[in-house]
Amino acid sequence: MTAHHERAALEREAHEVLRHLRCGLDDLAAVLERLRQIREASDAPRDHSLVVEHGPNGRPEVTR
């Protein structure tokens, strides 16, 4: 593998890692927003009965 091919492969891998990180951050933001909504709706400062689990699609979801 030439240096050019190796660099291109590393750049593709870096882009893939960044894509996964962005998806994870989007999932985290959605979970945090849902937790905020639940907390505001219940007027409770903290609800320790809430749990974040992986839903049927593999993405995190807030459950009780």
Image (cartoon, rainbow, N blue to C red):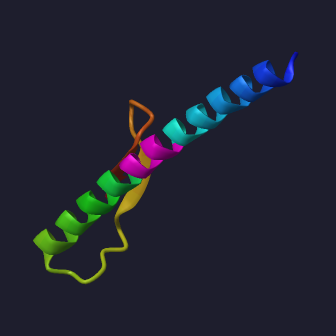
- The quadrant of the rendering that contains the C terminus is bottom left
Vertical comparison of 41 with 34: above or below: below
Horizontal relation, residue 53 to residue 31: left or right: right
Q: Could you say which is closer to the camera, residue 28 or residue 17? A: 17
**Number of numbered discs:** 0
Residue pictured at 32% horizontal, 62% vertical: 32
Residue pictured at 30% horizontal, 74% vertical: 47
Residue most extreme to the top: 1
Please provide percent x and percent y for residue 44: 20, 81
Give the residues drawn in magenta, as a range: 21-27
Please provide percent x and percent y for residue 39: 21, 72
- The quadrant of the rendering that contains the N terminus is top right
Q: Could you say which is closer to the camera, residue 57 or residue 13? A: 13
Please provide percent x and percent y for residue 58: 45, 34
Please provide percent x and percent y for residue 31: 33, 55
Residue most extreme to the right: 1
Residue most extreme to the front: 4
Quadrant hosting residue 43: bottom left
Q: Could you say which is closer to the camera, residue 8 or residue 58? A: 8
| Residue 12 lies within the magenta run | no
Is the magenta region chiefly helix, strand or loop? helix
Residue pictured at 41% horizontal, 39% vertical: 59
Residue most extreme to the bottom: 45
Residue pictured at 54% horizontal, 41% vertical: 18
